[in-house]
Amino acid sequence: MQIIKVKNYEALSKEAAKIVGNLLKSKPDAILGLATGSTPVGMYQNLVKMNEDHEISFKAVKSYNLDEYCDLPRSHGQSYYTFMHENLFNHVDISEKNVHLPHAEGADLAKQCAEYNKALNNVKIDLQVLGIGGNGHIGFNEPGTPFSNETFIVELTEKTREDNQRFFASLEEVPHRAMTMGIKNIMAAKKILLLASGKNKAQAIKELVFGNVSEKFPASALKDHDNVIVIIDDDAASLL
């Protein structure tokens, strides 16, 4: 596990974009595993600029997202489908047919879940981008999730729903379920890039670096992967 410490969120975003950008320069048809949330937004902004400046192209890139809320239309302002289009896809030269997110609405979620998992198993993700939750969750893999899980439907904890309430008008609007890559899917990527910024992530980073591998702390599974880069700013590194 390689740990890169940078001064602040701006530096973190640039360093992360540089790693993704270098991959696309060396492998224009790379397969990316992408994440949502506030942490990767700066990275996406830098990648958009690199694309506008013709440093990189997404024309041959395929992307697979970590997760999606269940029972939320893709057109909803808080769906991860909308997030990815607003923050990256609408601003770069990626082909819509190469964009993949879990389809998590409708009556047959189990079938949709199995189809997304099959799609993931038919490719090899070159670089998987991750954030980390305060309790160590990656994707929507909450504490106690078996490391052997593949794509599944998760009942969101009240803590997770409360954390995400800031994006919705009320807690009642926050979905109760999500479809997420399992830890087994995440670990299948050739390379993993985990980003963490802010003092609210410091305890999780301390646990990731110094703690034991345990299903009680999902991100600890990454210790058993042979190619992980963790980029943290001074605040997230404050307890190391």
Image (cartoon, helix red, strand yellow):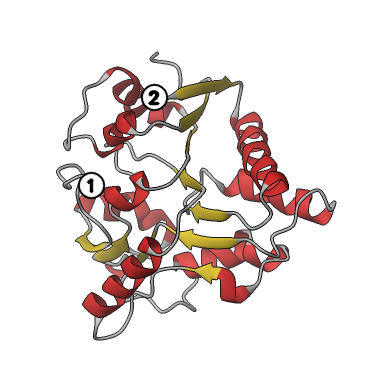
> What is the CA distance from the residue labelled 1 to the residue labelled 2?
18 Å
Residue 53 at x, y = what percent? Answer: 85, 51
Q: Amino acid at mark 2?
A: Ala
Which label sits in the foreground, 1 or 2?
1
Residue plotted at (71% across, 63% down): 91
On residue 111, which mark appears?
A: none
103 relative to 87 in the view: left or right:
left
- List the single residue furthest toward the bottom: 107
Residue tagged 2: 202
Which element carries disc 2, helix, strand or loop?
Answer: helix
Q: Splitting the image into 4 quarters, where does residue 210 fall? A: top left
Location of the N terminus (image quadrant): top left
Question: Mark 2 packing: few (<14 Cα in 10 Å), some, or many (20+)?
Answer: many
Residue for badge 1: 142
Q: Position of residue 26 (x, y in %)?
A: 69, 44
**Where residue 108 appears, x then y in whole percent?**
24, 83
User: At x 44% / y 16%, what residue is drawn?
Assistant: 238
Query: Residue 218's quadrant in the figure?
Result: top left
